Image (cartoon, rainbow, N blue to C red):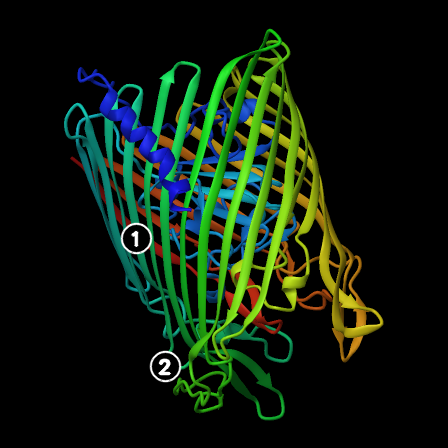
């Protein structure tokens, strides 16, 4: 397998030595982006390997730029991602505070997260990246994307693209923030050309906060760096490394009291005093890009990913009506040790097919992953086991079960993919893609030394779509796609679930996109309608509730719209909304030993109404005032739809002053009306995780 990884790199390196010694100085690239830029007309890499713009792509894709991140002050990655249409977050400590919901489907088995186009394979939570200081842009592709990235993307894909080396002069930036809850944040970045061949980019950031609940302290550090060698205008190499360490809030939710959330418990934390959460991640990549002529581009990257995670907490809290106290249980200690090495290589050809303009991309993806799980069987009761709801004594973690290595899963995966775009006329193009995925997954029982299973999974995902340009700036599109999701994270799959095949999904989508510059203003808008059906869910056998069978079905259909408009001098509006209907069509679960149908119910953590608005006003030459509104509709905490997390709307305000050409001060208020927000109910249906209340931050940024 090492030869497979290294072959593309060796070929590129040999080409480098054969290159002409006379190197042409590359042009300076201006990476500044206006918030009103025509994003639909700029290439987006996430939806296609053919370097198409969103206007040319038969799919729904949003791009959140660096300028938008800075204007909105979104330092937390989830806050930034959920500004995109139709995306909501359902973070909790067990999923690394990273899980998302899109188009009626949830969590990392259905909504994939990428870092610079690379996926961490087979887990149930992604813990890197987590902040936005080192981020250049975020691309959000909604709907099935297995043809690009493999199984696990029926709901969509979010690609976080870091800042990269540029050929311009060296520029530096420093940013400092102070805020409520004793929040402190510091970031430093530097990048540019060292000489006519070498360029670099480094970004460092750190933050700390006391949080919005008792014992809510958090500490985070992040580094991202890259060194690029431009051997010639046609050949470049880039070595990049990113590393993050998180100690997030040790908070697992607030229990309901007699079926409701009590406002007086808003800041209470029922975890133990010696609780621990810690995530350490490392991503290293060596990439090469070679353009031997104007019609051929070869790209290859060798990457290594390593993640270590540790939890040691009391995770379950239930209100006991007979005692009036909170009963605590579920003292859980877990260690994750996850590693992955892989290579992705693709070649793009531009030419003609039967006299028609054609672009073709072919490639492969191969990786090997391992995942070792240590735990205490999730058994233990803290001391004290029950606490006063209004004055909880933290106490200590207690477990008589040893925390030992229980199992190790390994996966060897390879994929072959092809994508093609043919232009039948200047207005009409067809884009199609096909991907074959193959994975061999095994699980070793580290207690008795046996092998629990060795299972092979394979799938063919494909899509076909068409774009018709009514005008150069107005396009109609349609797409049909088939994709697959695992029944759980493949690297954590149990022996029982290993017998089941991948879940499969189908989507039909139609839409319209336009870029405009007229009397109404300058901007762009999109409108999309879709229907998705996912089959082969795990459901309870009606004749034997203790047995699971793979016959279930879930579906969703919806409409999404977005608008970006500079409607008057100094005014900019960005808005989006999503309305969907998500349902279980064929799904049962065991209740009291009896199989109960949940057909027609909404899957948990799915918001069927979502909206975002951001309005900014450059009212004086050096002053910008802005306001944002985020609406998240009602979600259910259980399959029976008996417990509903209420909808909420939060308002953000900001005032920015450009003190000097290179110095900016910004005063921001988040959730300024202090609305109650609830993100998910993961640990029990009656234990809801709260979102932050009102926050105020002052940020200074200087570039030099």
Q: Secondary structure at mark 2?
A: loop
Task: Say left or right for 445 vs 181.
Answer: right
For residue 243, the mark is 1
**Residue 96 spot, x, y in % from top left:** 45, 61
Residue drawn 28% across the image and 64% down it: 182
Please identify the quadrant where the C terminus is shown.
Answer: top left
Q: Secondary structure at mark 1?
A: strand
Above or below residue 419? Residue 121 is below
Q: Which residue is mark 2?
A: 273
Task: Say left or right for 174 vs 447.
Answer: left
How many C-alpha atoms fall within 10 Å of the one at disc 1: few (<14), some, or many (≥20)? many
Disc 1 or disc 2, which is closer to the eye?
1
Above or below residue 154? Residue 467 is above
How many C-alpha atoms fall within 10 Å of the one at disc 2: few (<14), some, or many (≥20)? some
* Residues marked 1 and 2 touching at CB (< 8 Å): no
- Of residues 264 and 554, the one nearer the viewer is 554
**Residue 499 spot, x, y in % from top left:** 67, 62
- Of residues 365 and 474, the one nearer the viewer is 365
Please give the count of numbered marks on the rendered protein.
2
**Residue 326 spot, x, y in % from top left:** 53, 85
């Amino acid at each position: 397998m090492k030869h497979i990884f290294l072959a593309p790199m060796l070929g590129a390196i040999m080409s480098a030595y054969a290159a002409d010694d006379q190197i042409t100085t590359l042009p300076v690239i201006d990476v500044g982006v206006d918030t009103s830029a025509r994003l639909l007309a700029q290439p987006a890499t996430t939806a296609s390997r053919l370097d198409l713009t969103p206007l040319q792509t038969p799919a729904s894709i949003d791009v959140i730029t660096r300028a938008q991140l800075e204007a909105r002050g979104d330092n937390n990655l989830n806050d930034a991602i959920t500004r995109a249409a139709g995306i909501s977050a359902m973070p909790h400590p067990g999923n690394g505070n990273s899980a998302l919901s899109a188009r009626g489907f949830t969590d990392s088995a259905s909504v994939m997260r990428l870092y610079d186009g690379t996926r961490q394979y087979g887990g149930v939570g992604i813990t890197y990246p987590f902040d936005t200081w080192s981020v250049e842009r975020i691309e959000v592709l909604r709907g099935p994307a297995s043809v690009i990235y493999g199984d696990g993307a029926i709901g969509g894909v979010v690609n976080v693209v870091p800042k990269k080396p540029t050929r311009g002069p060296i520029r530096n930036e420093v940013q400092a923030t102070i805020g409520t809850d004793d929040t402190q944040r510091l970031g430093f970045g530097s990048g540019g050309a060292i000489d006519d061949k070498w360029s670099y980019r480094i970004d460092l950031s750190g933050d700390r906060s006391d949080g919005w609940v008792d014992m809510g302290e958090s500490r985070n550090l992040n580094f991202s760096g890259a060194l690029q060698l431009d051997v010639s205008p046609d050949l470049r190499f880039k070595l990049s490394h990113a590393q993050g360490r998180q100690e997030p809030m040790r908070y697992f939710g607030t229990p309901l009291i007699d079926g409701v959330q009590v406002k007086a418990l808003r800041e209470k934390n029922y975890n133990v005093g010696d609780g621990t959460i810690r995530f350490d991640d490392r991503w290293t990549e060596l990439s090469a890009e070679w353009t031997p002529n104007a019609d051929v581009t070869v790209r290859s990257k060798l990457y290594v990913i390593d993640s270590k995670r540790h939890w040691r907490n009391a995770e379950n809290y239930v209100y006991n009506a007979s005692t009036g106290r909170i009963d605590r249980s579920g003292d859980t200690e877990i260690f994750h040790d996850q590693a992955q090495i892989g290579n992705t290589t693709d070649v793009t050809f531009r030419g003609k097919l039967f006299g028609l303009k054609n672009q073709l991309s072919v490639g492969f993806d191969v990786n090997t992953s391992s995942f070792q799980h240590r735990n205490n069987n999730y058994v233990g009761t803290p001391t004290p086991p029950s606490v006063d709801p209004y004055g909880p004594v933290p106490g200590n973690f207690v477990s008589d079960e040893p925390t030992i290595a229980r199992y190790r899963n390994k996966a060897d995966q390879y994929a072959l993919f092809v994508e093609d775009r043919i232009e039948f006329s200047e207005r009409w193009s067809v884009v199609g893609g096909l991907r074959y995925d193959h994975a061999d997954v095994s699980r070793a029982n580290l207690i008795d030394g046996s092998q629990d299973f060795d299972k092979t999974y394979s799938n063919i995902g494909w899509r076909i779509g068409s774009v018709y340009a009514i005008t150069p700036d107005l396009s109609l599109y349609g797409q049909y796609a088939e994709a697959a999701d695992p029944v759980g994270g493949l690297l954590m799959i149990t022996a029982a679930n290993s017998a089941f095949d991948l879940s499969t999904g189908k989507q039909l989508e139609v839409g319209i996109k336009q870029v405009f510059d007229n009397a109404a203003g300058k901007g762009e808008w999109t409108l999309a309608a879709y229907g998705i059906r996912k089959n082969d869910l795990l459901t309870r056998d009606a004749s034997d509730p203790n047995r699971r069978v793979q016959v279930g079905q879930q579906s969703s259909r919806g409409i999404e719209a977005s608008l970006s408009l500079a409607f008057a001098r100094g005014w900019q509006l960005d808005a989006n909304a999503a309305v969907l209907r998500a349902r279980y069509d064929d799904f049962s679960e065991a209740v009291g030993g009896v199989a109960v149908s949940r057909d027609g119910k909404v899957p948990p953590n799915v918001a069927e109404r979502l909206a975002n608005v951001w309005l900014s006003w450059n009212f004086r030459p050096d002053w910008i005032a802005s306001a944002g509104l985020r609406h998240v509709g009602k979600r259910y905490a259980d399959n029976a739809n008996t417990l509903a997390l209420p909808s909420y709307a939060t308002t953000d305000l900001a005032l920015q002053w450009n003190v000097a050409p290179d110095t900016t001060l910004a005063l921001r208020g988040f959730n300024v009306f202090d609305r109650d927000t609830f993100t998910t109910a993961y640990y029990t249906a009656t234990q809801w995780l709260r979102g932050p209340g009102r926050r105020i931050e002052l940020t200074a940024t200087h570039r030099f």
